[in-house]
Image (spheres, rainbow, N blue to C red):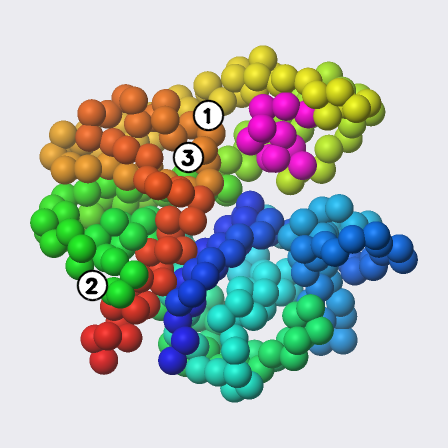
Amino acid sequence: MKILGYDGGYFANKAVWANGKATYPSVVGTANVSAFQTQATDDILVALNGEQYFVGNAAVSQSRTLLRPEDRDWYVSEEYYVLFMVALSKVHKMYNDRIRVVTGLPVRWLVSDRATLENVLLGEHKATVNDVIMKCNVIHAHILPQPFGTAFSQVLNTNGEFKDPELAQAKIGVVDIGGGTVNLAWIERMNQVEFQSDSAAIGAWNIVRELQDEINDVFPQLELRDHEVANAIGTRSVEYFGETHDINEIIEPVLKPFLETVYAFIGQHWKNVGQLKQIFITGGGAHLVGDELASRYVNAIVVEDPHMANADGYYRFGVFLENSK
């Protein structure tokens, strides 16, 4: 059985499987195919239910209309399903492949939304991705609290075996700064402590939205789309009329209040933070504020490749489950 670790976030989708990993922006757009191209591209084109969609960078650069619900119910949207089809295509090798999927939901929504997401993931799936016809069957769908992906990435190896048994028995915390939510998980012996685990409806996307207006005010003829703003934040610069402009002075005043909000959220739930052996800071937003946040706690670190850590851990847990049969 094939195993897919899948982290379908508001900002980016991440997939990990036995021999690879991939990430692509969580953007679906109308398939306005270019009439003329001089070189190969990394375009992702999905055909589903008689419609065609660009996904990821192709949608950002070529689609006239971007389709991206950002509310809590986006798991049941056509756009979420299209993004999931791309992830399945990464692990799909044979017609009628049987697949075990491990993914996550925000801590606060896990109990109420788990069954809804299971219905989306389980069963037979058919789509055409970049001209390859895919038909597969998701036999198992395991939905965890999102931060547990990172927790499993720290205690399991890629063979699904415990690489750090001592850590697996300890009290650890995970701060997951995602695109639409910040999730806290207080974990003891790899079990979640409910009253010290929660989600807040803030995330790195709040930073992008605010900076989008700021950048477009300073550079009025730039008109960056939101994912282009996210890329600009990553490089701390924009290209304007052929010249590179540093935007640190625009970014820093926006990052600081966001960081203070996250810090207050942690303080509200983890008043006994000194009991934790380790705090792991993860998620795409860790690239923006992770180091500063980690500097406030002597037991905190930003995990390696925080953008992919949850998907990586989901995959490792899937292998663990497969080995446990």
In this picture, residue 44 sits left or right of residue 302: right
Q: Return the residue at label 1.
A: 258
In this picture, residue 213 sits left or right of residue 223: left
In this picture, residue 221 sits left or right of residue 295: right
Task: Give how far apart the Cα atoms at labels 2 and 1 are.
Answer: 37 Å
* Mark nearer the N terminus (2 vs 3): 2
In this picture, residue 47 sits left or right of residue 234: right
Residue 14 x %, y %:
49, 54
Task: Give the mark count.
Answer: 3
Task: Give how far apart the Cα atoms at labels 1 and 3 are.
Answer: 12 Å
* Mark nearer the N terminus (1 vs 3): 1
Give the residue at x 27% y 55%.
152
Residue 71 x %, y %:
56, 50
- The local secondary structure at tag 1 comes to helix
Give the residue at x 18% y 55%.
163
Query: Magenta stretch: dominant SS?
Result: helix
Q: Residue furthest bottom?
A: 96
Asked whether residue 230 is drawn in magenta, I would say yes
Q: What's under tag 1, amino acid-wise? A: Phe
Q: Return the residue at label 3.
A: 286
Q: Quadrant of the N terminus?
A: bottom left
Asked whether residue 153 is drawn in magenta, I would say no
Range of magenta residues: 228-238
How busy is the neighbourhood of tag 2: few (under 14 within 10 Å), some, or many (20 plus)? some
Give the residue at x 67% y 36%.
228
Eyeballing the image, is 80 above or below 252? below
